[in-house]
Image: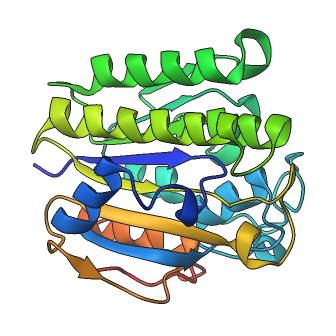
Amino acid sequence: MMKVLLVLSDGMRPDSIAEHKVVKHLMRNGTYCIEAQTVMPSVTLPCHMSLFHSVDPSRHGITTNTYVPQMRPISGLFEQLAKKGKNCAMFYNWEELRDITRPDNLCRSVYVSGHKYGNEAATKESFETAKKMLKNSDIDFAFLYLGWPDGAGHGHGWMSDEYMRAINECNDMVGELINELGDEFTIIYTADHGGHDRMHGMDIPEDMTIPIFFLGKPFEAGKEIEGLSIKDIAPTIATLFNADIPEEWEGQIVD
């Protein structure tokens, strides 16, 4: 039975992770793209909407971190998987992400406020909750959001010591998930955008370039792919579950 875990580290730049042992493991044992591209504006909510709906912000209409209802609604990944009868879950610590899916598409949703408890503590609690709930569960697809790196980037600067500490610890979390879940889940690890100085949102490589890793069946070990987009993630996951892909989706299937 296919199970998929999508982990997103907010604001993770590819050049911040190159030497980490977990990243080397992902590259050695999975399929990956180090220089995939996100969408403009390279801002958290628009990027997540594009990830889960496989279209540019100009199509789904979310261009800031404030959600507005879609004028021409597009079915997203959670909706397509729910139609297929799959159990979906989300673990997150940035409340605005509640709108990336419509009601009744999740069997479990766990939110820990990064604003109230701090990005570091909330990210760690989200991770621990996901690790505990996913093992030997009835969840088919889960999304785990790790918001700490973005908070560290805004607070101390991208590539600063605090940012790198957040990045390294989030990579360690992914390593724990790989060890804990074993072959039970195919794991996809990515980012929504990068960043520079203490900001992001511009059409520059530091903001637009993201890594994407695919580990587990049916992805090949040690296979590098060029030219991927954040919009390719939703159709790839939908295909793994034999779910329908809406005509509006723009991304390609990674295989």
Q: Position of residue 67 (x, y in %)?
A: 85, 47
Residue 74 appears in view:
yes
Report the number of numbered marks: 0
Q: Position of residue 127 (x, y in %)?
A: 44, 25
At x 50%, y 52%, the residue is 79
At x 63%, y 57%, the residue is 192
Res 249 → quadrant = bottom right
Q: Position of residue 30 (x, y in %)?
A: 22, 66
At x 35%, y 85%, the residue is 225
Question: In this image, 232 relative to 120: left or right?
Answer: left
Is the residue 172 above or below the residue 82 in the image?
above
Question: In this image, 21 relative to 52: left or right?
Answer: left
At x 41%, y 28%, the residue is 107
Res 181 → quadrant = top left
Is the residue 134 above or below the residue 87 in the image?
above
| Residue situated furthest bottom in the rendering | 227
| Residue situated furthest top in the rendering | 117
Front residue of this view, candidates 208 and 70: 208
Front residue of this view, candidates 217 and 248: 217
Question: In this image, 234 relative to 201: left or right?
Answer: left
Is the residue 9 above or below the residue 208 in the image?
above
Front residue of this view, candidates 86 and 217: 217
Q: Position of residue 62 (x, y in %)?
A: 84, 60
Front residue of this view, candidates 193 and 94: 193
| Colour option used | rainbow
Locate the C terminus and report the quarter of the image it occupies: bottom left
Residue 84 appears in view:
no
Question: In this image, 9 relative to 241: left or right?
Answer: right
Is the residue 74 above or below the residue 83 in the image?
below
